[in-house]
Amino acid sequence: MLDGRYRLIEPIGAGGFGQVWKAHDPKVDRLVAVKVLTGDGSADNDRQVARFAREAAVAGGLSHPNIVTVHDFGSALQNGRQYAYLVMELLRGKPLSVVLEGGRLPLPEVLRTAACVADALGTAHQAGLTHRDIKPSNIIVRPNGTATVVDFGITKSSDARHDITTSGVLIGTPAYMAPECFSGTFDHRSDLYSLGCVLYEMITGHRPFTGTSWHLINQHLHEQPAPLLKVRPVIPPELARLVKRLLAKNPDDRPADAFEVMLALREIDRRYYDEDSPSRGPDRYVRSAVTPRIAAHGAIKGLRLLDLNPCPACASRPSADICESCQGTGEVFVETTHRVRFPPGVRTGQRLRLKGLGWPGRNGGDAGDLFVVVRIEGEARSA
């Protein structure tokens, strides 16, 4: 029993300044997480205890579904040793750092996790708090797909009573620190840079910069990570641009605040991955050979394409049965002839764009476009 109240059950991890236990609080009959710091009487330990108390004051003053809830803080003498402890809600889920051990994440999961973190940071920043240590191990991914930010132990506050700084000591995790942090300058945009690093890692499966601490510092200060669209070409271009802005060396070039980032992430998610919202269908490409005469003078030519149409057999079957024609997808490929106008003067390799003839959209969204790549009969197939 800790402090005569909390029954420590088993260790479940280690935070920045102490060991974390699964525990039971019989007073309200609930399971909690208890972070415990062992005291040794040193000056350094006094500073850590002060940070412990500060984490309780900071996180306890924030109420947000994506920020860990703090229930209690205290100290106790046990077996002749002094312990400081922090009692928090017991979060179900895994640290994002553990999730990332399996490699890069599906893009909808990337967007939704990052939006939760941005929402939490927006609330903290509104309260005048900069987290200063946003990284995967401080983000808990919940079973319902949401994410929770933890460990406010080195948070910087606009309130001088809550600010603890050790001169000459690098505070934070170099792999995720903004360039200005290495000179001791922090503000809310530093957290946004760290979020950019986490986003990059979720998208690619690796950090934007790697190496020893001093090598990392030089990279953050002077180098650019590999472009996202080269590492993972299928990501939405809006997401690549957002991460690039978050990782800007100059804080003034980053988004204005975390809520702006949250809204951008949610809009990308809605546009590309929300199953309930209308979305535009993919474009498609076909090649078509034309005679030199058509290339020179132009003409209308029929193109035979495979289109996705509603399955006619499904309409006559009970909904419980699986349709043999479409295997339950509700759509079948049907060969259709489309009349395409080739303008005079087309060249081999030229692309004609036909709006609305691509693959169908989702939930009433517009169809994509059809791109016809021209080849003139008798010419080399260089296109």
Image: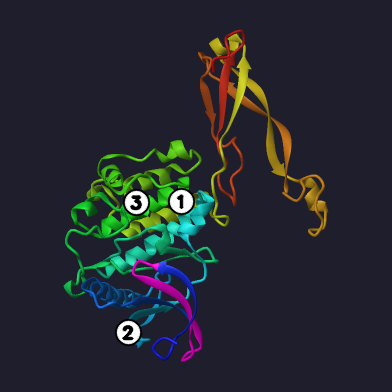
Q: Position of residue 352 (x, y in %)?
A: 53, 25
Total numbered badges shown on the rendered structure: 3
Check disc 1 and report the residue beneath it: 202
Relative to 222, say whether 69 is above or below: below
Q: Quadrant of residue 274?
A: bottom right
The x and y percentages for residue 87 are 40, 80
- Magenta span covers which residues? 15-31
Where is residue 335, by image quadrant? top right
| Upstream in sequence: badge 2 or badge 3 | 2
Check disc 1 and give the amino acid type.
Answer: Met
Q: In which quarter of the image is the C terminus?
A: top right
Q: Earlier in the sequence, mark 1 or mark 3?
A: 3
Q: Which of the two marks, 1 or 2, is nearer to us in this view?
A: 2
User: How far, Cα to Cα, is label 1 from label 2?
Assistant: 38 Å
Which residue position holds label 3? 175
Q: Of all residues shown, which one is farthest toward the front?
A: 80
- Tell me residue 139's x, y (percent): 42, 63
Q: In this view, does 251 lie to the left or right of 333?
A: left
